Image: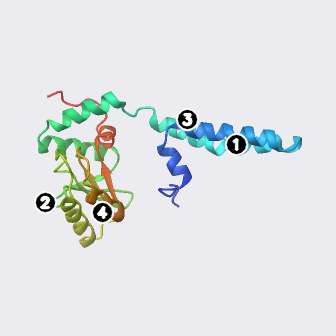
Amino acid sequence: MNLRPAKNSLFAILLRSPAWISFAIAVGLGTAAAALLPDGYRALGASAGLPFAVIGAMAAWRQRQLPGAAEIERIRETVARMAWPAFADLLEQAFRREGHTVIRGDGRAWDFDIELGGQRTRVAARRWKSAQTGLDTLRALQATREADDVAQARVIGLGPLSDAARAFASDKGIEVWQAPEIARALHGPLPTR
């Protein structure tokens, strides 16, 4: 039984959004129901906002330890100074902390295969310092993903994707991790050098 909402469902979007949005929807629905329904149905109608209040509470719980802008920038600067072996070790530790099993890749088209709950993700991260992630990196990752029948793919980099790479990632369903996602994954103390 899969209890995860579809990626682009309303509830999944609200879980990724600031919690106050869900709370505002809950209050708006409750207020509208209380104002528009007959006396006998107002209490029941006001409860229509309850699912949104629950989603707001879940979003607030998830977001309670998310790094702020200053922390994201500090982590971005720290990992930008790292050599690949140190950054790869940090990523592997982060994946394992989330419960993934981790296999190191060949370093050409992909760097990690991570698996959680039977779901494999192929990860390309070696070019994380590049000023811009281009289409070649994503095409190589996608080719190995298709050849090995891997369900998901992720590219990790501090620089933005080129327009062509962004369109390709969107079309092929490749997840993109940039500074905010890297900071979330590498929460906790990092080396200062």
Picture layout, residue 7 above or below residue 46: below
Picture layout, residue 56 above or below residue 7: above
Where is residue 97? Give x, y as percent.
Answer: 32, 43
Please state which amino acid type lies under the numbered disc 3.
Trp
The residue that mark 3 highlights is 20
* Marks 2, 4: nearer the viewer: 4
Please state if 140 lies on the left or on the right of 58 as rendered: left
Q: Secondary structure at mark 2?
A: loop
Estimate how packed mark 2 is, as few (under 14), some (14 to 19) or many (20 or more) residues with alpha carbons within 10 Å.
Answer: few
In primary-sequence order, the first of circles 2 and 4 is: 2
Please state which amino acid type lies under the numbered disc 2.
Arg
The image quadrant of residue 141 is bottom left
Task: State the residue at coordinates (17%, 61%).
Answer: 109
Disc 3 and disc 2: Cα gap in Å? 43 Å
Q: Which quadrant is home to the C terminus?
A: top left
Disc 2 and disc 4: Cα gap in Å? 19 Å
Task: State the residue at coordinates (27%, 71%).
Answer: 146
The residue that mark 2 highlights is 108
In primary-sequence order, the first of circles 1 and 4 is: 1
The residue that mark 1 highlights is 29
Please state which amino acid type lies under the numbered disc 4.
Phe
Where is residue 61? Give x, y as percent.
Answer: 50, 36
* Marks 3, 2: nearer the viewer: 3
Please state if 129 lies on the left or on the right of 3 as rendered: left
Please state which amino acid type lies under the numbered disc 1.
Leu
Disc 3 and disc 4: Cα gap in Å? 33 Å
Estimate how packed mark 4 is, as few (under 14), some (14 to 19) or many (20 or more) residues with alpha carbons within 10 Å.
Answer: some
Dots 3 and 4: beta carbons under 8 Å?
no
